[in-house]
C-alpha cells in the first residue's frame, strides 16, 4: 500500500484500519513524522536525514512510542526533538560526542606523524616528505575539517590537477599518496569520516621509471668525470654509492661504529622503511679500499667532524647533507647510481634474488620469505658483491689514464705510486685553498 498523507490527530489515527501489510501515514504538517500501521499496533515514528555541503551523510529512523500509550501531541513533540538532533548530525540514541568530522587536516597529520610514523621508526627523510606535502602543498587546508574533503572530493581532484600543472606529475601524485595515508589513518578513530577516501576520485598521472642507469660501457667515461672533481671525499661518496647500490640518504649517515672491516660489512640501522628494515652491506675489496680513502680524506678535510662520520662535512649535523652535483660536472649521481648498480649486477650474472638481497628490497614470492639473509651474508652475498665490483674494476683497468688506475688502488698498481698520487692531490687542494 502506498504511503498516505494527512494531518495526524488522535481521532484520525484511531480510524486507521490494519492491513495485510504494514503501511505508513505521514503527517502533512511535520515532515519526517509518521505513524506505522501494522496488524496489531500503530507506532509513532520519526525519520530524518543529515546533509552537509550538499551531500547526504546518513538517514536515521527512530521509534517514538505506540499509539494508545502516548497521544499524538506527545509524539509530535518527541518527533521534533528527534528530527532536530538528526539535523545537527547526531544519530538517535547516540550519546553526544565530539562533533562529527571535526578533526582538521592539521590534527590528522600530526596524529599520523606522531602515532604512526615516529612510533614505527620511519626514516626522517620520509617524515620530512610528508611534512612538505601537508604543510606546504595543502597549507590552506590544514585548519579545515578533514570531513569536508570526504564530502567534496572534487576539491581533491581540482588540487591534484593544479599541482600537476604547477609542480609536476610526480609531486602531484606523491602528495596525494600522503593525503590518502593521513585520511585512512584518521578514519580509524573518526568513524564519522566517510569510508570512501576522497583521493580515490583523482585520475593518477602516468609515471615512468627514470631509466638513468649506466651499463658496463658507460662506467669508464663516468669515472673520468668523477676523477676530475675537486673534492676527493665527495668522489669517494659517489664511487661507494655505485659500488654498494645503496640509497644516498642512508650512506650519508654512516658512522664509524657501523663499519666493521674485520667482518667486511657496513650496518645500515635505519634505511628506508625504518629500523625493522635494518641490514648489512657486504664489502668487496674495492669497497674496502674506497672506505679507507674516505677515512683518510675525512681526517684531512674535516678533522672536527671526522670522528663519528664516514663522510664528514662542514654542515650542521657534521656529515654530508647535499650529494647533488652539477650535471655538466658529474652526469650521474644519487639514484642514477643505484639504477646503475642494478644494471651492472644483471650484467655480472648475479641472480634476481641475490640482487634483491643486496639492495635490501622486499623479497618476491612466498618461498623467498624463508630465506635467512644473515646466513648468506658472510660468503655467498659477498661473492656476488665482489662480482659486481670486478665488473666496475674491469672498466678501470681498461682506462688509459694511469692516475685513475692508481686512485682506485687496483691490485695490479704499485702502492707507492698510489700514495704519491694522493699526496700530490692534497698539496694541490691546499694551494687552492
Image (spheres, rainbow, N blue to C red):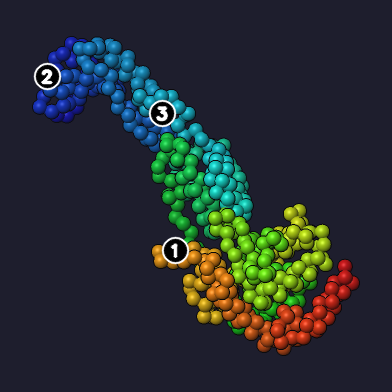
Residue for badge 3: 89
Of pointers 2 and 3, the one earlier in the residue sequence: 2
Q: What is the CA distance from the residue labelled 3 to the residue labelled 1? A: 48 Å
At 88% from the left and 68% from the top, the residue drawn is: 433
Of all residues, the one furthest to the right in this rendering is: 431
Residue 343 appears in the rendering: no
| Closer-to-camera residue (205/245) | 245
Q: Where is residue 359 in the image (x, y as percent from the top left)?
A: 55, 67
Q: Position of residue 87 (x, y in %)?
A: 39, 26
Q: Is residue 31 above or below residue 282?
A: above
Q: Is mark 1 on a helix, strand or loop?
A: helix
Q: Nearer the viewer, mark 1 or mark 2?
A: 1
Count residues near mark 2 (Cα–Cα under 10 Å), then give few for <14, some for 14-19, many for 20+. Answer: few
Residue for badge 1: 369
Query: Is 293 placed left or right of 89 in the picture?
Result: right
Query: In which quadrant of the rendered image does the N terminus lie?
Result: top left
Res 283 quadrant in image = bottom right
Q: Is mark 2 on a helix, strand or loop?
A: loop
Q: Where is residue 79 in the image (x, y as percent from the top left)?
A: 31, 19
Q: In this view, does 136 lie above or below 335?
A: above
Res 281 quadrant in image = bottom right
Res 190 quadrant in image = top left
At 52% from the left and 68% from the top, the residue drawn is: 375
Residue 325 appears in the rendering: yes
Amino acid at each position: 500500500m502506498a504511503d498516505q498523507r494527512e494531518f495526524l490527530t488522535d481521532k484520525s489515527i484511531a480510524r486507521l484500519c490494519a492491513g495485510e501489510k504494514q503501511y505508513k501515514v505521514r503527517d502533512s504538517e511535520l515532515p519526517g513524522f509518521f505513524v506505522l500501521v501494522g496488524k496489531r499496533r500503530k507506532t509513532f515514528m520519526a525519520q530524518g536525514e543529515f546533509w552537509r555541503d550538499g551531500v547526504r551523510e546518513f538517514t536515521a529512523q527512530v521509534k517514538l512510542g505506540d499509539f494508545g500509550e502516548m497521544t499524538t501531541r506527545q509524539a509530535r513533540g518527541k518527533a521534533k526533538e528527534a528530527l532536530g538532533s538528526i539535523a545537527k548530525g547526531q544519530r538517535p540514541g547516540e550519546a553526544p560526542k565530539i562533533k562529527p568530522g571535526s578533526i582538521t587536516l592539521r590534527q590528522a597529520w600530526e596524529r599520523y606523524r606522531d602515532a604512526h610514523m615516529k612510533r614505527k621508526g620511519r626514516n626522517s627523510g620520509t617524515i620530512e616528505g610528508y611534512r612538505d606535502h601537508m604543510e606546504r602543498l595543502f597549507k590552506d587546508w590544514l585548519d579545515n575539517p578533514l570531513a569536508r574533503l570526504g564530502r567534496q572530493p572534487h576539491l581533491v581532484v581540482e588540487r591534484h590537477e593544479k599541482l600537476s600543472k604547477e609542480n609536476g606529475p610526480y609531486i602531484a601524485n606523491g602528495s596525494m599518496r600522503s593525503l590518502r595515508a593521513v585520511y585512512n589513518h584518521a578514519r580509524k578513530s573518526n568513524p564519522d569520516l566517510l569510508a570512501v577516501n576522497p583521493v580515490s576520485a583523482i585520475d593518477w598521472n602516468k609515471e615512468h621509471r627514470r631509466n638513468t642507469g649506466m651499463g658496463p660501457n658507460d662506467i669508464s667515461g663516468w669515472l673520468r668525470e668523477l676523477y676530475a672533481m675537486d673534492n676527493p671525499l665527495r668522489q669517494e661518496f659517489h664511487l661507494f654509492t655505485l659500488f654498494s647500490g645503496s640509497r644516498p640518504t642512508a650512506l650519508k649517515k654512516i658512522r664509524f661504529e657501523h663499519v666493521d672491516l674485520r667482518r667486511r660489512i657496513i650496518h645500515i640501522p635505519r634505511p628506508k622503511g625504518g629500523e625493522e628494515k635494518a641490514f648489512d652491506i657486504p664489502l668487496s675489496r674495492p669497497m674496502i679500499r674506497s672506505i679507507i680513502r674516505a677515512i683518510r680524506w675525512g681526517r684531512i678535510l674535516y678533522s672536527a667532524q671526522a670522528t663519528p662520520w664516514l663522510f664528514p662535512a662542514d654542515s650542521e649535523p657534521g656529515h654530508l647533507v647535499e650529494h647533488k652535483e652539477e650535471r655538466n660536472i658529474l652526469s650521474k649521481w644519487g639514484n642514477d647510481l643505484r639504477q646503475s648498480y642494478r644494471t651492472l649486477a644483471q650484467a655480472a650474472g648475479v641472480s634476481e634474488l641475490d640482487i634483491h638481497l643486496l639492495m635490501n628490497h622486499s623479497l618476491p614470492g612466498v618461498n623467498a620469505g624463508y630465506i635467512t639473509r644473515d646466513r648468506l651474508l658472510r660468503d655467498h652475498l659477498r661473492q656476488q658483491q665482489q662480482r659486481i665490483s670486478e665488473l666496475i674494476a674491469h672498466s678501470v683497468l681498461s682506462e688509459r689514464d694511469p692516475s685513475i688506475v692508481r686512485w682506485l688502488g687496483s691490485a695490479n698498481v704499485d702502492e707507492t705510486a698510489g700514495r704519491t698520487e694522493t699526496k700530490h692531490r692534497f698539496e694541490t687542494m691546499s694551494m687552492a685553498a
